[in-house]
Structures are given as structure tokens and as C-alpha cells.
Image (cartoon, rainbow, N blue to C red):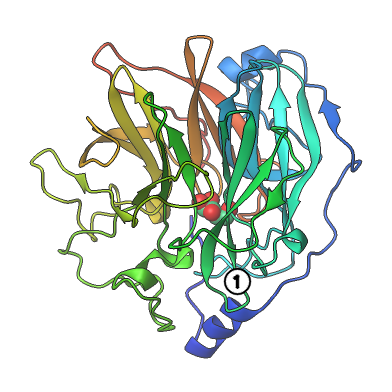
Amino acid sequence: MQRFALLLGASLIATACAAEVEPAAEPEGPAEAVAQEQPAGAVAQAEGAEEADSPFLNAPLVTEIYTADPSAHVWDDGRIYIYPSHDIDAGIPDDDLGTQYAMRDYRVLSMDEPGADVTVHDVALSVDDVPWAAQQMWAPDAAEKDGTYYLYFPAKDENGVFHIGAATSDSPTGPFEAEPEPIEGSFSMDPSVFEDEDGEYYMYFGGIWGGQLQRWATGEYNDDPDLVADLGDDAAPALMPKIARMSGDMVSFAEEPRDVMIVDENGDPILTGDHDRRFFEAAWVNKIDGTYYLSYSTGDTHYIVYATADNPYGPFTYQGRILEPVQGWTNHHSIFEYEGDWYLAYHDTELSGQNHLRNVKMTPIRLTEDGLFETVDVYSGD
Ligand code: FUB
């Protein structure tokens, strides 16, 4: 599985960074919220097989739009809400920057329980309604505090630089109103916001290559066009995801972002050259029985892996794989609990066969008595 053709020259990369992309036609259904009937045996899908001869363990949750990067939450009303990216076909060829992921808005999915009918809600936030954002509305997340819902999203500004924005609503499905500026001190992409049991909220974020985390290694944005997939010394510690505690207003950081160290069993940082274990994108945190679980994508090796810690800042010790590669280049997930059982929301490309047109799925995931995630393999194809 190759993500992007390695063919971009420096000028093309710079142009791609700055270019604003208009969406092409997409397979949209009705604009209003739609409850999509699940095929017979939908509960079984959430728990296991799609069809006996299918290489896919689970069926797409919705087929009327393309969805990816699912951030799943169960809010106080007991429903499951999924905040996904809304993939579109902008007709852009694959590249190492992910320029083909040219999404322009968000739509929320919700369901009563695993396997139930899925409602595709109307547009929750459009790039046209975010004053600072120009393009590429990538993987979002959401949080709830005191009855207000917060949508966190990455987007590129008019200079092609990723930042993270916040938007608010009194409904979990929006519409959300965006803050006029990105979160001060935010950069890169793939935000996820974790609520700790003491009422503090933390944002984890970052992603390398097209996610631009490597461009901020010195604390300032480095626009060197060669600084994409070649991140230097393989024997050096890898770039780590970032964490910042959220302020009480939930739309700003209470502190400077800092590294979330991911270490091996000896306490040594995972190295740049360790592509099977190093952080690439899609940080997600759960707290289970007092232990913090940081899961993330390894990107070009296509795994979802995890590491554990005894506090939200880490260091997190690498533990193993949660999800084997899916069909499609990207692998991006979230983990949530529903009525005492754990579920993995993920995506693949079953509907389209194309890397940038993905579909969200979910599957049960189990913890062993030792508190380790069992590895899930949802795709038996190549
Ligand atoms: O959806 C665009 C990007 O692809 C996400 O931000 C990454 O995590 C990857 O899934």
C-alpha cells in the first residue's frame, strides 16, 4: 500500500500548500438529516462479520457520504455521536502532503446504540464559515462541558499552514459557530480532546508529513519544501504528539503545548526509524481503570498502536497493536465505551477503493485481564 507518489518537486509542493481547492461533485444524499437504515444483521456487524465471503469484517456505517477519521463519544443522552472527516473527491492526485484530502465541511453521525440506524446530520461546520481557514478540514474531535459542545478541527490558513480551530454549539450535532481565530499556540493537525475524571480537559494533537508537525520542530514554522517525508536521523528520538491542557473557556490553551513522550520497554524514546512504533498521526486518549491509554496511527506502516501511562502527560510506554492495516493508506480510529463494552471506530476504503474517499466503521474491541488491548484485524485482503 503506497500512500502517495513520491514525485513532487519543491515548487509543486509549495504550490500545493498554498492552493485552495474547490470541491468536485460528490455522492451526496439529501441535505437534511437522514436516518440510514442498517442492513439486516446490523448488530452483528458491530460485533463481527459483514458477509461470509467478504474480506471486510464490518460494513460501512453510512453510504450516502464518504466519512473518515471517526471520533466517537457517548454524551449524556446515551446516544453515540461520531465526529468524522467528510471526504470529497476534488480530483487531486495522491501526494506526500495529502493534498487530495481536500475536505470542506463536517457532518456528524449519531445512533442509539451499536448496530442501530445511523443518522447523518446536516452540515455542522463549513470552511466558508471559518474566518481564518482556507482549505483541508481534516480529522476533528468534540468535547462537551456544561451543556455546550465544542468542535475542534484542523485546517490550513491562506498560507497553507495548519492550525487548530474551535467552534461551539448548544447541540451535539451543530451547527457550530467558529471562533474567529485558530487556538493561539496551536499548529499541525488531528486534535483530540480528552476529559479527565477531575474535570480537566487536554488536547492531544499533531501529525508528521502532510500534517506538518516536523515543520515546528524548532518552535517556529519551517517552510523548507523538502521537509516532508524525510525526517532526518533514524537513530534520533521520533517526533512526538503534543499535549496542552485546555483553559476553562475550552477554546484556548492553558499552557504551552509540550511533547508527549512515547518510550519503549526500557524507557528509551521510540526512534525516528522505528516506523512500526513511532507516532505518525491520530492521537487518541482513554482512561481505563486509572491508566491512560494513548493510541495513534503509525502512518506509513498503517497500524493503530498504543502506549500507556499513569498521567495524561506521559511518558507513555509502548504496548502493542490495536488494529492491523485496513484497506486504504490511512488508518485512523477512536475508542469508546458503550454500556460497559469497548468499541473501536475506524475507517477503510471499502466503498470507493480510493485512499481519499473513506467510510467509517466500528467493531468491538476487548481488553485482557492484564489491561492490554487485543489486536483487531478487520481486513483479510491484501
Ligand atoms: O483525513 C485527513 C487525514 O488523513 C487525517 O487528518 C489523518 O489522520 C489521516 O486520516
Say which amino acid is labelled 1.
Asp
In this view, the residue farthest toward the left is 266
Answer above or below: position of 168 versus 113: below
Answer with the quarter of the image where residue 235 lies: bottom left
| Residue at horizontal 55 percent and vertical 44 percent from the top | 327
Residue at the spot of label 1: 157
Please tell me which residue is depicted at 41% across the width and 73% down the height of the picture: 228
Q: For this view, does 246 lie left or right of residue 106?
A: left
Q: In front: 276, or 18? A: 18
Q: Which residue occupies the extreme front position in the image?
A: 248
- Residue at the location (64% across, 56% down)? 179
Q: Is residue 135 above or below residue 369?
A: below
**Residue 147, quarter of picture:** top right
Badge 1: how crowded within 10 Å, few (<14), some, or many (20+)?
many
Point out residue 33 in the picture as x, y percentages from the top left corner: 85, 34
Along the line of sight, the residue nearer the viewer: 136 or 12:
136
Left or right side of 351 for 282: left
Say how many tags the image has: 1
Q: Position of residue 20 (x, y in %)?
A: 70, 75
Of residues 284 and 368, the one nearer the viewer is 284
Image point (40%, 34%), residue name: 200
The residue at label 1 has a CB less than 8 Å from ligand 1: no
Q: Is residue 57 visible?
A: no
**SS for tag 1?**
loop
Q: Residue 133, image x and y in percent? A: 65, 66
The quarter of the displayed image where residue 197 is located: top left
Residue 100 appearing in the image: yes
Residue 86 sits above or below residue 18 on the image: above
Residue 86: % across, % down: 70, 49
